[in-house]
Amino acid sequence: MPVETFRCPSCGAAVSSQATRCDFCKATLATVTCPSCFGLMFAGAKFCSHCGAKGTRSEVGGGEPRLCPRCQFALKSVTIGPTDLLECSRCEGIWVDAETLQQICADREKQALASSASTLDQPLEIEKTIRYVPCPVCHELMNRVQFAQCSHVIVDVCKAHGTWFDKHELQRAVQFIRAGGLDKARAQQLEQLKEERRRLVVSRLYGGTIEPGTPSPSANGGFGLTTSAIHILLDLLS
């Protein structure tokens, strides 16, 4: 995967995101998460190189220790802007509990009305070996699902406790939301629901089962005026 190029917060020189030390001023470098777009930025940088947001971050002590589901390294409790997260400093993954993720989605969806999403300069990395990982809280294996069903971002989810985002995945999810992706997801789900209702009504009217992928009946299909009755029933169901 191509690496990103950032600016050293000490001298301003161009530095790879994978560098641990600036080649020019020899300052020690570490990447942290942006409080707005959740992209990576250098620790000590005043503003995010992706979205321009001010970098505000603090580590939180105490709390029950949790292990990274990927590398079993101790997760750090951090407050990034107004958001509390658990970060892995080794693989740069992020654990977000269910309530916090809901708040992130709501906040970023509001921002979608006022700004357009920037394009991510990191290409989508396809995981070659699929591995199910345990929830940091209950240690049960999590489900692998596509965030919002149409984002092309595959995340690991424990329904009871939260979601694990590998490196860059939370940033991609936020960009998807800011581009109006949740509205698109809702529209797709609504269409799927309408189609399932349509199949249910047709099945009841004709005493059979309509297989998924079968075109809905129409006047040209031999059902004649009954199609109008079906649409009326669908309206009532809606």
Image: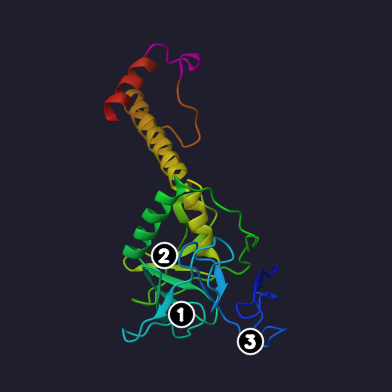
Circle 2: residue type:
Val
- Where is mark 1, residue-wise? 68
Q: Which residues are magenta?
A: 218-225
Circle 1 SS class: loop
The image quadrant where one finds the N terminus is bottom right
Q: Rate crowding at label 3 as few (under 14), some (14 to 19) or many (20 or more) other CA atoms within 10 Å.
A: some
Q: Farthest top residue?
A: 225
Disc 2, SS:
strand
Cα distance, mark 1 to mark 2? Answer: 14 Å
Residue at figure coordinates x 35%, y 58% from the top left? 102
Residue 181 percent coordinates (x, y) = 48, 47
Amino acid type of the residue tagged 3 in the rendering: Ala
Q: At numbered mark 3, what does the secondary structure look like: helix, strand or loop?
A: loop
Which residue does the numbered mark 3 point to in the structure image? 27
Residue 157's label in the rendered image is 2
Q: Determine if the magenta segment contains residue 223.
A: yes
Left or right: where 46 falls relative to 86: right
Given residues 142 and 153, the one toward you in this image is 153
Residue at screen point 39% across, 38% down: 190
Quarter of the image for residue 40 reads bottom right
Judging depth in this view, the residue of 111 and 182 nearest the camera is: 111
Residue 163, picture quadrant: bottom left
228 to 201, vertically: above or below: above
Tell whether label 2 touches label 3 (CB within 8 Å): no
Q: In 3D space, how far apart are the residues under numbered discs 3 and 2 (Cα atoms)?
A: 38 Å
